């Protein structure tokens, strides 16, 4: 079961502990809840990215919205430990499936940003069931990551 969901979720560095469908009066629709944890020995500071020793088990459960499976909304749920970083202090450990501070997985953010290239923000927010502002924030975050990782087309330019 673990390997099937790891392939379906397309997330490396994670262990799937449990999968269940959560439904209740507080939820507008049932959610496929996937309980995960980072692989052992992979604890890193979420600010500087360096490997660090664990500090404690963390302050509770965190949730990240993932790409939908057909008509099922998918959420990754994890108890996130904290690390003691001499440079950054005691911070939540980074996860391989999401950026620090984001409530969405990298795959969900990439899908949202790609959809924003072919449709307007209102359409994308309705299609992905996120707020209009959230779709814009995700697109800006992905664009910033791409801009930071890609070389400038003007690098090495000497004259025009």
Image (tube, grey):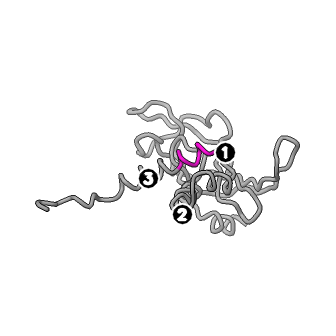
Nearest to the eye among marks 3 and 1: give it: 3
Q: Residue 42 versus residue 25: which sits nearer the camera?
A: 25
Q: Nearer the viewer, residue 24 or 156?
A: 156
| Location of residue 120 in the rendering, given as x and y in whole percent from the top left corner | 57, 56
Q: Is residue 58 magenta?
A: no
Task: Residue at 71%, 56% (x, y): give it.
Answer: 74
**What is the C-alpha distance between the residues marked 3 and 1?**
23 Å
The image quadrant that residue 160 belongs to is bottom left
Q: Is disc 3 in contact with disc 2, using a CB cutoff of under 8 Å?
A: no
Residue count near mark 2 (Cα–Cα under 10 Å), binned few <14, some 14–19, many ≥20: few
Q: Is residue 55 left or right of residue 75?
A: left
Q: Circle 2 is placed at which residue position?
A: 118
Majority SS type along the magenta span: helix
Asked where in the image residue 147 lies, by quadrant, the reply is bottom left
Judging from the image, what secondary structure is the residue with disc 3 in? Answer: helix
Query: Residue 94: percent from the left, percent from the top?
Result: 51, 45
* Residue ID for mark 1: 63
- Could you give the CA–CA distance between mark 2 and mark 1, rounded to whole angstroms? 28 Å
What residue is disc 3 on?
143
Q: Earlier in the sequence, mark 2 or mark 1?
A: 1
**Mark in front: 3 vs 2:** 2
The residue stretch that appears in magenta: 132-138
Q: Is residue 77 left or right of residue 47?
A: right
**Separation of disc 3 and disc 2 at Cα?**
15 Å
Residue 116 is left or right of residue 145, and the answer is right
Q: Is residue 135 above or below residue 152?
A: above
Specify which label sits upstream in the sequence, 3 or 1.
1
Q: As displayed, is residue 114 above or below residue 143? A: below
Q: In the current view of this chain or complex, which residue is farthest to the right?
A: 25
């Amino acid at each position: 079961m673990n390997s099937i969901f790891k392939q379906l979720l397309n997330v490396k560095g994670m262990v799937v502990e449990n999968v269940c469908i959560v439904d209740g009066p507080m939820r507008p629709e049932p959610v496929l809840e996937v309980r995960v944890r980072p692989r052992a020995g992979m604890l890193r500071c979420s600010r500087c990215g360096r490997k660090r020793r664990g500090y404690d088990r963390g302050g509770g459960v965190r949730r990240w919205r993932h790409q939908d499976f057909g008509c099922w909304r998918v959420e990754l749920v994890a108890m996130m430990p904290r690390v003691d970083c001499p440079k950054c202090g005691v911070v939540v450990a980074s996860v391989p499936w999401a950026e620090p501070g984001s409530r969405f997985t990298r795959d969900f953010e990439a899908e949202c940003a790609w959809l924003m290239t072919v449709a307007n923000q209102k359409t994308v927010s309705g299609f992905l069931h996120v707020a209009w502002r959230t779709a814009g924030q995700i697109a800006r975050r992905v664009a910033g990551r791409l801009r930071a990782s890609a070389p400038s087309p003007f690098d090495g330019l000497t004259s025009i």
